[in-house]
């Protein structure tokens, strides 16, 4: 049973065993507006929890996507590199960013679950 | 004061509306210790006539290129600029508009930038070009920084035949960035010993090179590609690309060029216009503004500034460059001149330049003691003289001929280059000018 | 597009009714790209046939066509004339872009810059043939030194951002020379993006300083961030909120006490020229935008010129070349030797933006010491006049008087459905260039208005009346009309998303020519 968690920087992470898929939330894509470009790391590179893992751009803004966990990138979503609109259309599905092999499978413990994240977003107004 | 529309009555009325007793009230936030009580110690206002008289007096102390037989190049070239160019760029809608931040009010600027980018891409044989940088030297430094970003490698190798100002600007820009700049020793008439290794971000060569020589860069491009480094080609004299193969065809990854030759006067060195062209795959690492095509709300074709997220106003400290203002009006002058020339005009202009330089090279190298260094050249070449070139330049100037640039002006520490003279001839050189030069040099060397 | 109100469709013809066969609309004439007007072989310049001679191009002759179009002179003149007519300009109307200083550009200065004695001299001519050019540069430096109170001027930077680079590099060079490897630059959150971008090029980390509730640097926060690893503070004064940093003397003292340098972005010097000298504010380095304060034309985005005033501690590091007073009068120092041995090096080719120097000196001599002081006073008076004229309709971000520009935010648009962008676009239909939008970043939906001193009271009144009327319309529930603006321009709102997703940065021969939509 995959575990879904969220960060205060509006990334989501879905863990299944020792790998996890990472993307940005619906709230994040709404705030950015029409996404025009996504810069992804190369497979095989390492990401570090809290550090920049990807960049997402709208026509008038650029924003870093931070890795919620540390690990090695095992796959990136080439589809959104070609068609960034997918991130707007389906941020939690087809619009995923990368898959990471977790250094430590317990890393998700400190993150918010869906209910906590929805409450957090509601506070943002 | 002729430029200030407010009348004394306006000022009184406006202060009253604001509720200020005097203009000083509006400067109340200035700490008293920093307020200037009276006027700065400078002359007071003058009329047009007086200002023109004073400044024209300074201009009159200079020797304009057009008043003498003139053969100086070295990165700036005197060409005939059609009268229509200067007329058009002085239209107030071009001259007195701002950077096109509101595209609906700046379709004119955006369309000419799009056309300019296309012209630069075509001329250099590259896929994309930006909307201009300050000049060729800063474009070259930006190219090196871009290669560093793309390859993440720490070293740039500069050809010894790269314009020394371009070398110097690359060094200045890189000195605090952690990038190592290796500038090879200038050795006119010989190939650079370029050693590309795994740390090399880019190799920068000039085409035609600083001493006028033309080299085929294809083999070097292949070596760069093999080693994972980028080839940056700098061009001083953009008119040359009307005659010779473009750097893009040789495999250049970035072209950084000076565009002054088209549309722009010599202006004692500025303002000029930096041209910057690259491969489409690197477009998001390019510095500077880019105009792009799109459609409006009614579906009609129009233009906007695009890929702005590379730039300082959005990306701030992570921007690809800090550039903001570029050389818009100089780019327009370039573009208009090139539109007037077109394919037929540019290729003919280039041939005229080459013909003038060939004639001059033959005449001067026929003078006793003078040797032509170049095998192949476009409109500029190097001569070895039997006397120090700086001395020859001064003596020629004394005879009313501006005959070139002594290499020692750039390399004062290089005794072996003291006799080297760079000479350029463009379409502006007449047969009489060439005669006058040959006669004057013969006398100087006698 | 749907959603136009009945009232609006009565005022404006529908798209179908206003359609013409040509796509032209009166004086707004559609103009194809030059590449789409190609008459192969045609040329707008008559050149002689080159003489027959042996080619010496080393076998590198061009093999294929370049692809440039052929046009005659009348076609070219018409093309660019039509393009020009699609631009707004300071010559045609009020251009209140905050922080950009769109003031009148005197035509005398264009004439002076084109004198052959300046325009037709080569930067590498023997110095003996360009003494007048060096005299002009030296005279310009003299004026700028007197106006700033600073002892040295570095003239070669080509624009404001280039001047920042120059100033920050001299600071880093001075610190390096004293063996001081400081790492951080403090930059207020309200700063222009070039400030952090420049500091990053110089290898520094950027540390933002918050504003206080009065729109100035928070002095306590600044002091808390100062330390032995801070290289400099980059401050804009007057700042980008249009306010004078009234604690600037304390700021400068704190920065100097920490052993750091005080860099000032002089983009807004036009507000204080002739009334305040930056040297008296404790500033170590300050760039001036000749294309702002000293009215060299903006030219649709350049060329500019960004001379940097330097304190004595930084002057030895000024970039090459230097104009020096030698034994035979003025001379050029072009190498890192003698007095110039500690230079940061060269920042651009040749000697600087000579054409801009001539224009700026013409501007300064025309105004004189008295006129320049009046420039600052009228600029500040005009901005404050707009401030009070707009006070009831808009929401001023920081109360009280302003300097040369006044900052509003989008609180006045709350619950109207109209955004700052929509409001700006509606101004376009009224014949005005909009103010600066969404900058500075420290207030929400910023509208930054800088009228400059070259606007008459009548022009300001007309602008204020228009803005006030639009604000009233926004409050009356006409959001759709704002969202549809502009309607009267050669093009309506442009799709920037598609432009960025699928960048089309040049014309290609196989590109289909897009006609007006059906």
Image (tube, helix red, strand yellow):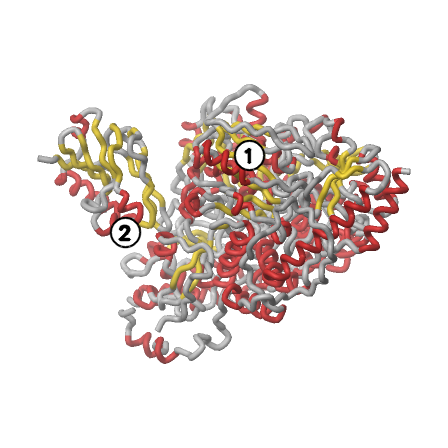
In which chain is the residue bearing label 2?
A
- Residue C274 percent location from the top left of the image: 63, 46
Q: Quadrant of residue B296?
A: bottom left
| Residues flagged by tags 1 and 2 on a common chain | no
Instruction: Point out the frontmost of discs 1 and 2.
Output: 2
The quadrant of the image that shows the N terminus of chain B is: bottom right
Q: Depth check: C440 or B352 in front? A: B352
Label of residue B108 in the image: none
Q: Is residue C240 left or right of residue A105?
A: right
Q: Is residue C480 left or right of residue C284?
A: left
Up the image or down, B232 lies above or below C496; here it is: above
Residue occupied by mark 2: A85
Q: Is residue C354 visible?
A: yes
In which chain is the residue bearing label 1?
B
Secondary structure at numbered mark 1: helix
- Residue C103 percent location from the top left of the image: 57, 57
Secondary structure at numbered mark 2: helix
Residue occupied by mark 1: B173
The quadrant of the image that shows the C terminus of chain B is: top right
Q: Residue at x 60, y 36 (%)?
A: B169
Question: For the residue carrying disc 1, how many other residues have a C-alpha within 10 Å: few (<14), some (14-19), or many (20+)?
Answer: many
């Amino acid at each position: 049973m995959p575990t879904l968690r969220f960060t205060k920087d509006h990334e989501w992470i879905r863990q299944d065993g020792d790998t996890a898929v990472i993307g940005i939330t619906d709230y994040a894509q709404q705030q950015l507006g029409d996404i025009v470009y996504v810069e992804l790391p190369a497979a095989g590179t390492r990401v570090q929890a809290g550090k920049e893992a990807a960049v997402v751009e709208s026509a008038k803004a650029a924003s870093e996507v931070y890795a919620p966990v540390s690990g090695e990138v095992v796959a990136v979503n080439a589809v959104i590199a070609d068609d960034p609109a997918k991130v707007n259309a389906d941020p939690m599905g087809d619009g995923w960013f990368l898959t990471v092999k977790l250094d430590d499978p317990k890393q998700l413990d400190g993150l918010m679950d869906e209910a906590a994240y929805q409450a957090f977003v509601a506070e943002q107004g | 004061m002729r430029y200030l529309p407010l009348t004394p009555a306006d000022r009184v009325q406006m202060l009253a509306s604001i509720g200020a007793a005097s203009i000083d009230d509006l400067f109340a936030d200035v700490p008293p210790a920093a307020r200037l009580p009276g006027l700065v110690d400078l002359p007071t206002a003058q009329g047009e006539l007086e200002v023109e008289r004073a400044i024209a007096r300074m201009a009159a102390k200079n020797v304009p290129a057009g008043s003498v037989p003139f053969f100086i190049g070295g990165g700036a070239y005197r060409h005939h600029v059609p009268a229509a160019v200067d007329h058009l760029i002085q239209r107030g809608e071009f001259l007195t508009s701002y950077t096109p931040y509101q595209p609906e009010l700046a379709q004119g600027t955006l369309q000419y930038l799009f056309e300019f980018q296309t012209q630069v891409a075509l001329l250099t044989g590259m896929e994309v070009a930006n909307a201009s940088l300050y000049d060729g030297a800063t474009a070259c430094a930006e190219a090196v920084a871009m290669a560093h970003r793309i390859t993440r490698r720490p070293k740039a190798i500069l050809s010894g035949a790269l314009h020394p100002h371009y070398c110097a600007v690359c060094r200045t820009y890189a000195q605090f960035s952690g990038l190592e700049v290796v500038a090879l020793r200038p050795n006119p008439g010989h190939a650079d010993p370029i050693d590309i290794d795994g740390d090399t971000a880019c190799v920068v060569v000039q085409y035609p090179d600083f001493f006028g020589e033309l080299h085929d860069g294809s083999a070097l491009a292949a070596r760069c590609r093999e080693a994972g480094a980028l080839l940056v080609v700098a061009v001083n004299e953009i008119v040359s690309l009307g005659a010779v193969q473009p750097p893009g065809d040789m495999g250049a990854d970035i072209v950084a060029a000076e565009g002054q030759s088209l549309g722009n006067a010599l202006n004692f060195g500025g303002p000029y216009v930096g041209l910057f062209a690259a491969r489409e795959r690197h477009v998001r690492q390019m510095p500077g503004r880019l105009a792009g095509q799109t459609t409006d709300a009614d579906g009609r074709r129009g233009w906007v500034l695009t890929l702005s997220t590379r730039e300082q106003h959005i990306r701030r400290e992570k921007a690809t460059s800090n550039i903001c203002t570029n050389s818009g009006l100089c780019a327009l002058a370039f573009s208009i001149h090139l539109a007037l020339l077109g394919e037929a005009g540019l290729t003919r202009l280039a041939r005229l330049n080459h013909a003038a330089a060939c004639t001059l090279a033959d005449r001067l190298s026929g003078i006793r003691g003078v040797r032509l260094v170049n095998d192949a050249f476009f409109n500029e070449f190097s001569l070895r003289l039997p006397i120090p070139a700086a001395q020859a330049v001064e003596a020629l100037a004394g005879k009313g001929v501006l005959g070139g640039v002594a290499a020692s002006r750039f390399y004062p520490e290089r005794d072996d280059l003291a006799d080297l003279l760079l000479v350029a001839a463009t379409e502006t050189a007449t047969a009489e000018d060439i005669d006058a030069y040959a006669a004057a040099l013969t006398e100087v060397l006698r | 597009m749907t959603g136009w109100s009945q009232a609006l469709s009565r005022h404006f013809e529908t798209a179908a009714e206003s359609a013409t066969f040509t796509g032209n609309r009166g004086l707004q004439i559609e103009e194809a790209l030059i590449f789409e007007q190609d008459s192969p072989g045609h040329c707008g310049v008559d050149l002689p046939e080159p003489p027959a001679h042996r080619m010496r191009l080393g076998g590198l002759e061009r093999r294929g066509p370049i692809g440039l179009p052929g046009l005659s002179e009348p076609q070219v003149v018409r093309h660019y004339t039509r393009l020009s007519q699609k631009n707004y300009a300071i010559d045609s109307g009020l251009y209140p872009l905050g922080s950009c200083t769109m003031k009148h550009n005197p035509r005398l200065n264009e004439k002076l810059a084109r004198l052959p004695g300046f325009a037709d001299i080569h930067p590498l001519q023997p110095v003996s043939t360009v003494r007048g050019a060096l005299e002009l540069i030296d005279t310009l430096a003299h004026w700028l030194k007197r106006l700033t109170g600073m002892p040295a001027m570095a003239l070669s930077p080509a624009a404001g951002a280039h001047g920042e680079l120059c100033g920050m590099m001299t600071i880093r060079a001075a610190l390096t020379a004293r063996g001081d490897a400081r790492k951080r630059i403090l930059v207020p959150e309200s700063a222009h993006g070039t400030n952090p971008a420049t500091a990053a090029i110089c290898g520094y980390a950027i540390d933002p300083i918050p504003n206080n509730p009065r729109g100035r640097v928070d002095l306590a926060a600044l002091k808390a961030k100062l330390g032995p690893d801070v290289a400099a503070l980059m401050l804009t004064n007057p700042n980008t909120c249009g306010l004078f940093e009234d604690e600037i003397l304390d700021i400068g003292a704190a920065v100097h006490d920490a052993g750091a340098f005080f860099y000032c972005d002089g983009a807004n010097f036009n507000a204080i020229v002739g009334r305040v000298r930056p040297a008296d504010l404790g500033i170590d380095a300050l760039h001036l935008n000749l294309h702002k304060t000293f009215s060299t034309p903006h030219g649709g985005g350049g060329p500019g010129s960004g001379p940097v005033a330097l304190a004595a501690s930084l002057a030895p590091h000024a970039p090459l070349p230097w104009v020096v007073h030698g034994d035979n009068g003025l001379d050029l120092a072009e190498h890192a030797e003698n007095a110039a041995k500690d230079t940061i090096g060269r920042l651009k080719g040749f000697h600087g933006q000579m054409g801009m120097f001539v224009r700026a000196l013409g501007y300064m001599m025309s105004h004189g010491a008295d006129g320049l002081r009046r420039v600052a006073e009228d600029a500040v008076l005009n901005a404050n006049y707009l401030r009070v004229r707009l006070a009831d309709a808009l929401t001023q971000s920081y109360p009280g008087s302003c300097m040369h520009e006044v900052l509003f935010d989008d609180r006045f648009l709350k619950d109207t459905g109209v955004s700052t962008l929509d409001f700006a676009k509606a101004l376009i239909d009224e014949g005005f260039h909009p103010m600066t939008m969404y900058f500075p970043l420290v207030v929400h939906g910023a509208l930054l208005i800088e009228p400059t001193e070259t606007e008459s009271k009548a022009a300001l009144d007309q602008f204020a009346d228009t803005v006030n009327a639009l604000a009233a319309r926004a409050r009356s529930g006409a959001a759709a009309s704002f969202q549809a603006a502009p309607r009267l321009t050669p093009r309506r709102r442009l799709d920037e998303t598609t432009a960025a997703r699928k960048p089309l940065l040049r014309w290609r021969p196989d590109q289909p020519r897009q006609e007006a939509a059906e």
